[in-house]
Amino acid sequence: MNEERFHRRELVAEVLAGADDRLLVVAGLGQSAWDVTAAGDRSLNLPLWGAMGGTLSVGLGLALARPERRVLVITGDGDMLMGVGSLATVAAQRPSNLAILVLDNERFGETGNQATHTAPVQAPKEERGAGTDLALMARGAGIADSDTVHGPKGMERLRHDLLKGEGPVFRVAKVLVEPLPLVLPPRDGAHLKERFRQALLGEA
Amino acid sequence: MQDAHQPDWPSDVFEVLLAQRVRQVCYLPDAGHARLIALCHASAEMRPIVLTTEEEGIAVLLGGWLGGDRGVLLMQSSGVGNCVNMLGLARTMRYPLLMLVTMRGDFGESNPWQLPMGQATGTVLQAMGSIVFSADRPAEVGRVVEAAAGMAFSGNQAVAVLLRQRLIGAKRFEAAR
C-alpha cells in the first residue's frame, strides 16, 4: 500500500515547480501550508494558519474574482471533511479556473495523527476510519472531474490536470504519513493578505 | 405585503450594494432576504453564491477580496451561530466583511426554538470583533447599510447589520384546523 503513496513534499514541490504569477495558491492549515511553503514562499500563496474547513471557500471566492488566473487549493483530508459542503457550493458556481488537491494521509496530522474518516475500515481500532472517499463525495456534490490518484506513476497527469484541466478539477492524492520538518510561512494574516493583493492587484 | 406608504427597504439595500460595487453576494436564504436575493440574481453586476452553511461565506469573501472583488454575506440570525470560529478569519486577516442579518428569535417570535440564538446574535458577533448595527424601521435601513458598508470597505472591518424582527415581521406558525 505504502509504495503507492506520494511523499507530500515532493508532490507539492513538483506541482508548484516553475509557478508564475498566473498561479494563485491557497493552502489549508497545518501540513499543507508547510508543504506549500517548503516549495518556496511566494506572495501569491495564501497559507492559512486557521479557519479549518474554509480553505476551498477562500479558493472559490478568489477564482470567481480572477477568472483569468488559475487558482489551486491544496489542503488536507481533515480540512476538506470539515468543509465538505463547500464542494457543493463550488459545483454550483462551476469555476473553470479552480483546481483542488487534497493531500490525503488519512490522519489529523497536527494533533497526533489520529485517524480521519478517510482511513480504511479494515485497520486496528485506533487507525480505523470509515473508508470515506472524498473524490466520490466531490463527484456526488456535482464536481464531475473528481478522482483519486494513488501513486507517483500518475504524477505527470496529475500536474497537468491541476494546472491545465478544465475546472473545477478535484483530485485526492493518497500521501504517506511521515514526520517532516516544519517550514513556516509568515504568521500575520493581515501581512499575508496585503502582500498577496499587492502582488496580484498592485494595491494593498 | 408591500405597503404603498412604506419605503421599499430591500430595494434600498440593493441600491446601496450596487453603489458600493458589491459583486459577490453569498447567502443562505431567509424569508426576510428573499426580495433582496431575487434582486441580486436579476443583476448583471452581481454574482450570487448560495452556500450550504454560512461560515463558507466568510471564507469566500476573503478569497473575493484577495482577488479584488467586494462582497456581502446575507444570512439569518441562526446562521451567525454557524460562523463563530470563521469570524476569527476576518479579525486575523483584516478584510472587509459586510454581513446583513435578518433576525429570528427577536421581537414577537412565535417559535421558541429560535430564541436562544436570536437573543445571542449581537453578543456573538461583538465577541468575535464585529461592529454591530441595528435597523428596525424601514426608512432607516438603506442609511444604516450604507454606513456599515462604508466602514467595512474603507476600514477593512467586519460589520454586521441586524435587520430586526420589528422591521421584517415575526413569522407566524398556526396549525391547520
Image (cartoon, coloured by chain):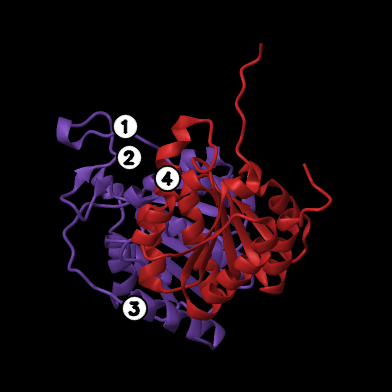
Q: Name the residue under label 1.
A: A130
**Image quadrant for the N terminus of chain B?**
top right
Q: Is there CB contact under 8 Å for labels 3 and 1?
A: no
Q: What element carries label 3?
A: loop
Q: Residue at x 76, y 57 (%)?
A: B7
Q: Nearer the viewer, residue A142 or B119?
A: B119
For residue A118, which numbered disc appears in the image? 2
Q: Is mark 2 on a helix, strand or loop?
A: loop
Q: Residue at x 41, y 58 (%)?
A: B125
**Chain A image colour:** purple
Q: Disc 1 marks which amino acid?
A: Ala
Q: Disc 3 marks which amino acid?
A: Gly
For residue A14, which numbered disc appears in the image? none
Q: Is there CB contact under 8 Å for labels 4 and 3?
A: no
Q: Is there CB contact under 8 Å for labels 1 and 2?
A: yes
Q: Which chain: red? A: B
| Mark 1 or mark 2, earlier in chain | 2
Q: Is mark 4 on a helix, strand or loop?
A: helix
